[in-house]
């Protein structure tokens, strides 16, 4: 068999690098590949072929620290890992570098004297300068080794010593140097009250504590009387003890309780018990569940002296629930007009009364226009001293006339001045062609007053006394007649049959051929104009006796 260890085709007998690790002469492991020539123990035998890597005289297979010299094979915790390579030599679960007793188990890392040497390996555990072996109190500092009762047990750890003579051995005495025979300890902190600087355990020293025997950690003192809230029987300082105070945290010395709910007014968020919090209640001290506020003044009706907000107190208001600032009472019945269902006192309800503000008990309506005679400006179809209508006459009025529309030979106005003279029987004559888009007009202008105002108490009513020679007048026959109001020559309003401002026609009982035409003006005016003609005209002759205005 041709031996060739590295299988490179060169027999071992003539191969300079039998193990094929690239190193020929001088290889510290000639038959075991050791390319990096590592030699941990520096003995000339490379690690790849060294049976004792750490050079401690023990073969790797039996060495408890094969890579670190541990010739004595020490293993403090007996875990099979030699101390030289064991990260936790004492096996207490704490690594050597963090262990305050690395060679002696001290799992809890107890260090009574805080000297960084664990108790299990500290020769002076209590750090009093006396080694434990000669210390009469090895775990309690007793540097002077005092032993008052000479029993060999130092005073610092002798449970049978009674230093304060209160009959309680120091070992169990919660105040070993201050008499506290009853062992009272209010805060159960192990320090008796006789020697406890904070008896109630609220972290406030007794001398500064406003409740020294009752915990009051934040030192709250609501009434500022120097007695903390935790021990104050009258927290709000109103002179009423907590047990009987209906506002225990808010001063309520008189114990007022408007709604009788047991909660005083000073702390009751709903004083009147109407289920509305006082902060948003428009009557905080008078129940007003629905929060009604008729006049929207922010004061609820239940507590508002002037519910309707008309400036008159309810006790004197003739309409307490309806604004009636002027206290007008037309019928003098003590009930103001704003809330009186029969304002004029004629025993007819306003909704049914044809004269709601003028007594018209029999509801007489001569002209059947729905407006009772007592309040109808045109209930009397006349124009003169005994009528609501006054004629526009000279010298307070003037006339002018003219034509409009297409050329019309038959159209015109004659004797226009007769429409403003003092004789109601005379009349200006207006002529026109039937069905022709042309006609004439007669304008009556006022000189005094210069302008008829239509502001309240208007509207004013205009009236014209008309006649048709030897014939009756009807509304249908007035299709070619319009009444126009003007101011400074500018048209203000126009009334005609079938328009929004409709004409009304009344016969004059005293004269069968006379008719009174009227309408209500809503705009100021200084002249009234009669226009006669147009395609809708069916008349050829119209007489104008008077132009009249009703004064409010």
Image (cartoon, rainbow, N blue to C red):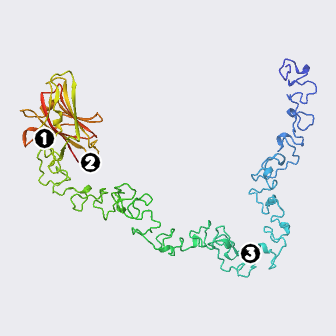
Q: CA distance from mark 3 to mark 2?
A: 113 Å
- Image position, residue 217 (x, y; %): 62, 66
Q: Are marks 2 and 1 in contact (CB under 8 Å)?
A: no
- Residue drawn at point x = 26 percent, y = 55 percent: 338
Question: How many residues crowd mark 3 within 10 Å: few (<14), some (14–19), many (20+)?
Answer: some
Question: How many residues crowd mark 2 within 10 Å: few (<14), some (14–19), many (20+)?
Answer: few
> How many numbered markers are drawn?
3
Q: CA distance from mark 1 to mark 3?
A: 141 Å
- Image position, residue 170 (x, y; %): 73, 76
Q: Foreground residue, 38 or 182?
A: 182
Disc 2: which residue: 457
Res. 108 in view: yes
Quadrant that contains the N terminus: top right
- Residue drawn at point x = 37 percent, y = 61 percent: 274
Q: Foreground residue, 106 or 481?
A: 481
Res. 497 in view: no
Secondary-structure class at tag 3: loop
Identify the mark nearer the N-term, 3 or 2: 3
- Image position, residue 183 (x, y; %): 66, 77
Disc 1: which residue: 424
Question: How many residues crowd mark 1 within 10 Å: few (<14), some (14–19), many (20+)?
Answer: some
Which circle, 3 or 2, is nearer the viewer?
A: 2
- In terms of image quadrants, where is residue 69? top right
Classify residue 343 as left or right of residue 64.
Answer: left
Disc 3: which residue: 159
Q: Is residue 522 above or below residue 321?
A: above
- Image position, residue 153 (x, y; %): 80, 74
């Amino acid at each position: 068999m041709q031996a060739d260890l590295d299988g490179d085709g060169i027999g071992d007998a003539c191969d300079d690098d039998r193990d094929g690790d690239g190193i020929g002469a001088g290889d510290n492991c000639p038959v075991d590949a050791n390319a990096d020539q590592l030699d941990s123990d520096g003995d000339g035998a490379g690690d790849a072929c060294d049976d004792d890597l750490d050079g401690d005289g023990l073969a790797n297979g039996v060495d408890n620290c094969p890579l670190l010299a541990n010739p004595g094979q020490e293993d403090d915790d007996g875990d099979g890992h030699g101390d030289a390579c064991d990260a936790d030599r004492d096996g207490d679960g704490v690594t050597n570098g963090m262990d305050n007793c690395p060679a002696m188990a001290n799992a809890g890392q107890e260090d009574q004297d805080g000297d960084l040497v664990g108790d299990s390996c500290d020769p002076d555990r209590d750090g009093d300068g006396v080694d434990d072996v000669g210390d009469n109190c090895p775990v309690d500092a007793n540097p002077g080794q005092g032993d008052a009762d000479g029993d060999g047990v130092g005073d610092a750890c002798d449970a049978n010593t009674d230093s304060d003579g209160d009959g309680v051995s120091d070992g169990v005495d919660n105040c070993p140097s201050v008499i506290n025979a009853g062992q009272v300890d209010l805060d159960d902190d192990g320090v008796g009250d006789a020697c406890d600087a904070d008896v109630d355990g609220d972290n406030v020293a007794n001398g500064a504590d406003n409740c020294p025997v009752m915990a009051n950690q934040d030192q709250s003192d609501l009434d500022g009387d120097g007695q903390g809230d935790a021990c104050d029987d009258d927290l709000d300082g109103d002179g009423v003890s907590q047990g009987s105070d209906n506002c225990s945290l808010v001063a309520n010395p008189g114990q007022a309780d408007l709604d009788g709910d047991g909660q005083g007014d000073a702390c009751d968020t709903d004083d009147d018990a109407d289920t509305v919090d006082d902060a948003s209640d428009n009557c905080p001290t008078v129940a007003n569940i629905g929060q009604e506020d008729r006049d929207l003044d922010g004061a609820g009706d239940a507590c508002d002296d002037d519910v309707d907000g008309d400036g008159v107190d309810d006790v004197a208001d003739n309409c307490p629930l309806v604004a009636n600032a002027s206290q007008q009472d037309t019928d003098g019945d003590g009930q103001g007009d704003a809330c009186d269902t029969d304002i004029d006192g004629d025993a007819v309800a306003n909704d049914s009364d044809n004269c709601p503000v003028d007594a018209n008990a029999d509801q007489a309506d001569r002209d059947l226009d729905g407006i009772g005679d007592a309040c109808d400006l045109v209930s009397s179809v006349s124009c003169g001293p005994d009528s609501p209508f006054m004629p526009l006459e000279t010298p307070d009025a003037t006339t002018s006339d003219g034509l409009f529309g297409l050329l019309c030979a038959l159209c015109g106005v004659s004797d226009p001045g007769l429409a403003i003279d003092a004789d109601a029987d005379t009349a200006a004559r207006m002529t026109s062609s039937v069905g022709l888009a042309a006609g004439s007009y007669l304008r009556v202008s006022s000189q005094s007053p210069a302008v008829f105002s239509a502001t309240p108490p208007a509207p004013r009513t205009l009236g014209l006394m008309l006649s048709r020679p030897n014939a009756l007048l009807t509304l249908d026959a007035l299709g070619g007649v319009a009444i126009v109001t003007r101011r400074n020559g500018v048209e203000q309003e126009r009334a005609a049959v079938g328009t929004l401002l409709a004409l009304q026609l009344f016969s004059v009982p005293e004269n069968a051929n006379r008719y009174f035409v009227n309408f209500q003006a809503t705009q100021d005016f200084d002249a009234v104009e009669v226009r006669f003609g147009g395609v809708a005209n069916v008349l050829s002759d119209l007489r104008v006796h008077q132009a009249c205005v009703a004064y409010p």
